Amino acid sequence: MLLLFGCALAAQVSQPAFAATLTVWQGEAVVKGANVDCNQPVSRKTIKAGTVLKIVLRPKNVNDNGANTNVGFTRDSQAEFMMVLDNGATSGTAPTFGVDQSGVIHANEGNPYSGFVQVPSSLSASDMFATLSGKITNFMYLAGCKVTFAATLSRRAD
């Protein structure tokens, strides 16, 4: 049995690694405005103007990033909310994936978004900094919660 495990491990180690180069920008997003549905009975779930979240942006068509833009938000290292923007669209309904502040996993939920503005509008691997702003409905899986946000990001070193 141990010999089989050792052979399987050796075969796995000798496999060539996938050489994709994903290029991402990371930073902080600040909630600029939030409606009353973002105010939750449990304070750690509440989203309001001034709430700061970590953000990761993987824009479309940069190196091996693919044709869609991915935007991920993390709150208090507990809740995660990741959006897939079809072809980098600035508005629409995005499938979202993540986990809410109660630990409930969410997958492939449709969340409306609009007014997304990325600067520069077409990022390249040589761009060091970017900004992103927009509006999201049902933000962080809070039903009816509508926020506007603004984010500043820097390219993560390879």
Image (tube, rainbow, N blue to C red):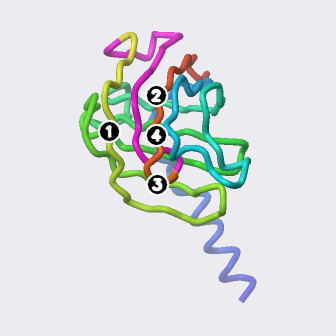
Query: Residue at the location (63% across, 33% down)?
Result: 53
Q: CA distance from mark 3 to mark 2?
A: 15 Å
Work out whether 32 lies above or below 5. above
The mark nearer the N terminus, 3 or 2, is 3
Tag 1 and tag 2, C-beta contact below 8 Å: no
The magenta stretch is: 121-140
The residue type indicated by label 4 comes to: Ala
Quadrant of the frame with the C terminus:
top right
Where's residue 48, x and y in %?
Answer: 61, 34
* Front one among 121 and 93: 93
Where's residue 30, x and y in %?
Answer: 59, 24
The mark nearer the N terminus, 1 or 3, is 1
Query: Residue at the location (44% across, 62% down)?
Result: 107
- Which secondary structure, mark 4? loop
- Which secondary structure, mark 1? strand
The residue indicated by pointer 3 is 143
Q: CA distance from mark 1 to mark 2?
A: 17 Å
